[in-house]
Image (spheres, rainbow, N blue to C red):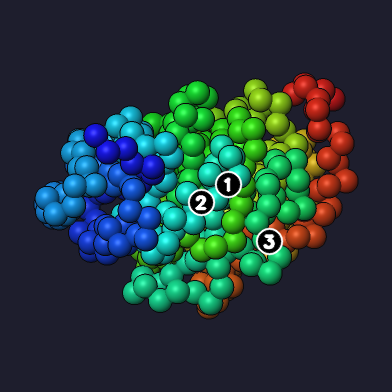
């Protein structure tokens, strides 16, 4: 039996609009020794038939049909049947560049890392690529990743599961899988990879094209979604505590705090009263800001954070509405930059690094 070198797992749910282009981007890879696992997660549209039609034409394609269990469950199901030495993930509405598998395979073989991160590029719903990739190719060349390097490594060690290749044995040895059911499933998965790996590696080549859908999650986050995120964030925080990685978590927190606020601001699915309910439910999370010695988020969000600290939720709600209208007027690329802290924020945080490095959990808060 022929052994494949990379298993690419594609969770599929009601993806008939994009799935053919997604599968085609895998079939056309310059690197041919791949196993394509299409996990049909109980789709109600034509996705199942499309996947099975492709499987009949290409023996590298395996279709796994299952009841709907969500993204995390679908990825785990794909991982359980994967046979290759390495694993990659591709979402059903996104694309690989034609040489993505080749570049990632070469990088992980050469570096002998437990995982490799590649660059990615946003594209509009119609497939038009944004002007620049996510990570500055002039600033970040190939390098070994160090989770204690907050000047360079941290900025490419993002939380998404899909712009990476993983050594399958590493995932199995450390029991790394996606938590079910939970929003922010990528965060938990990648955080365990960063904490458990001997080391990772980064390449600046764009290997992933991420579709910025008009119906993006950030605009359609429901109250139920934010309740799920609350549980996920508690789970992720506890994982960092248990592994004595609070200093790394501080930088993750700063990034996620800004992103969470922008999700709350942009959502069209919750009203003002529900936003206040969300803010109150996240009190435990926002209170960590002082304990972790976190300075401001992006300057546009500073006022919101101060009002949250004062628990003046009516004023927070008003300020969020003002920002929502303002953000609507901005191009997508500019709006995305507002969802993350600035470099100055991280530089300010570094003053407190020594307090958190190589210390037990309780010591950090004394």
Check disc 2 and report the residue beneath it.
Answer: 106
Question: Neighbour class for label 3 at 10 Å: few (<14), some, many (≥20)?
Answer: some
From the viewer's perspective, is residue 74 above or below residue 261? above
* Residue pointed to by mark 1: 110
* Image location (x, y in percent) of residue 40: 22, 44
Looking at the rendered structure, the secondary structure element under dot 2 is helix
Q: Which mark is residue 96?
A: none
Q: Which residue is mark 3?
A: 140
Q: Residue at x 39, y 31 (%)?
A: 180
Asked whether disc 2 touches disc 1, contact meaning CB atoms under 8 Å apart, the reply is yes
Work out how far the residue at label 1 is from the one at label 3, CA to CA, in angstroms: 18 Å
**Would residue 325 be seen by someone viewing this image from the given angle?**
no
Q: Secondary structure at mark 3?
A: loop
Question: If the image is split into quadrants, where does the N terminus sit?
Answer: top left
Give the answer, above or below, for where 34 lies relative to 215. Answer: above
Q: Which secondary structure lies at badge 1? A: helix
Q: Which of the two labelled residues, at mark 2 and mark 3, occupies the earlier sequence position? A: 2
Horizontal and vertical percent position of residue 110: 58, 46
**What residue do we see at 37% from left, 37% from top?**
84
Q: Which corner quadrant holds the C terminus?
A: top right
Compared with residue 353, is residue 121 higher up or lower down, i.e. above or below?
A: below
Q: Nearer the viewer, mark 2 or mark 3?
A: 2
């Amino acid at each position: 039996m022929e052994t494949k070198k990379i298993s690419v797992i594609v969770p599929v749910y009601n993806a008939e609009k994009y799935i053919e282009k997604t599968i085609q981007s895998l079939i056309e890879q310059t690197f041919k020794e791949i196993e394509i696992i299409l996990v049909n997660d109980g789709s109600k549209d034509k996705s199942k038939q499309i996947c099975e039609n492709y499987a009949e034409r290409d023996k590298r394609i395996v279709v796994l049909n299952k009841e709907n269990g969500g993204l995390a469950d679908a990825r785990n199901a794909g991982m359980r049947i994967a046979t290759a030495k390495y694993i990659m993930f591709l979402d059903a509405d996104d694309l690989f560049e034609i040489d993505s598998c080749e570049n990632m395979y070469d990088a992980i073989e050469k570096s002998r890392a437990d995982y490799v991160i590649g660059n990615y590029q946003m594209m509009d719903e119609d497939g038009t690529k944004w002007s620049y990739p996510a990570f500055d190719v002039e600033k970040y060349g190939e390098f070994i990743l160090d989770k204690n390097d907050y000047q360079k490594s941290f900025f490419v060690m993002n939380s998404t599961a899909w712009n990476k290749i993983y050594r399958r044995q590493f995932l199995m040895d450390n029991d790394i899988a996606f938590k079910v059911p939970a929003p922010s499933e990528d965060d938990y998965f990648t955080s365990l990879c960063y904490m458990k790996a001997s080391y990772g590696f980064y390449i600046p080549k764009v290997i992933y094209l991420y579709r910025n859908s008009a119906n993006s999650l950030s605009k359609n986050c429901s109250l139920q979604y934010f309740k799920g995120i609350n549980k996920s964030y508690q789970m992720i925080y506890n994982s960092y505590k248990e592994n004595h990685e609070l200093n790394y978590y501080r930088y993750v927190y700063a990034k996620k705090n800004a992103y969470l606020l922008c999700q709350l601001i942009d959502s069209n699915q919750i009203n003002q009263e529900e936003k206040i309910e969300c803010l109150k439910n996240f009190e435990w999370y926002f209170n960590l800001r002082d304990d972790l010695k976190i300075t401001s988020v992006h300057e546009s969000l500073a006022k919101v954070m101060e009002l949250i600290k004062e628990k003046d939720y009516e004023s927070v709600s008003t300020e969020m509405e003002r920002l929502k209208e303002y953000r609507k007027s901005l191009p997508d690329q500019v709006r995305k930059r507002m969802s993350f802290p600035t470099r100055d924020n991280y530089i300010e945080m570094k003053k407190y690094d020594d307090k958190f490095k190589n210390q037990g959990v309780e010591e950090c808060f004394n």
